[in-house]
Image (spheres, rainbow, N blue to C red):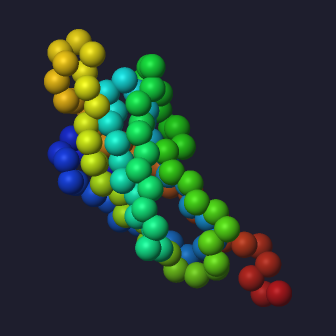
Amino acid sequence: MLTDKLGDYMRFTFTGTAISIFGTRGVKQGEIRFFYDDEALTFDRGYPKLVCNEKIFEVSGLPYGEHQVTAFLLRKGTNPKTGKQDGVFSVQRIKYTVPDDLDD
């Protein structure tokens, strides 16, 4: 997923006990708001340099079952060269966990 529009979102439903979302961090990346199971978390992806495939969200210890994560671009970062808001919301991969002992 890649967007530069404030309010654009992605939604992912999974069955498991944990989830990690990976994307970009950098100087002008801004904030992402995550919602999961009636909880909310805001993550500022600001970082001194552009890096890819960084963990930008993680939750574990969820009861086994169906869960949904929604994330949207809350605020863009500031471009240090222009002083204007800039940046994108990029999700590169999602990893979720299903316990090995489901039959026990």
Query: What x and y, as percent, mark residue 74?
Result: 27, 48
Query: What x and y, as percent, mark residue 21?
Result: 50, 52
Query: What x and y, as percent, mark residue 67?
Result: 50, 75
Q: Residue at x 37, y 23 (%)?
A: 27
Query: What x and y, as percent, mark residue 23?
Result: 44, 41
Looking at the image, the residue that sits furthest to the top is 81
Looking at the image, the residue that sits furthest to the right is 104
Q: Is residue 72 left or right of residue 49?
A: left
Q: Relative to 69, is 64 above or below?
A: below
Q: Relative to 103, is 26 above or below?
A: above
Q: Residue at x 21, y 30 (%)?
A: 86
Q: Is residue 86 visible?
A: yes
Nearer to us in this view, 44 or 1 = 44
Q: Is residue 38 left or right of residue 15?
A: left
Q: Residue at x 58, y 81 (%)?
A: 65
Q: Residue at x 54, y 43 (%)?
A: 55
Q: Relative to 66, is 12 above or below?
A: above
Image label count: 0
Q: Is residue 62 left or right of residue 104?
A: left
Q: Is residue 13 visible?
A: no
**Quadrant of the image containing the C terminus:** bottom right
Nearer to us in this view, 46 or 101 = 46
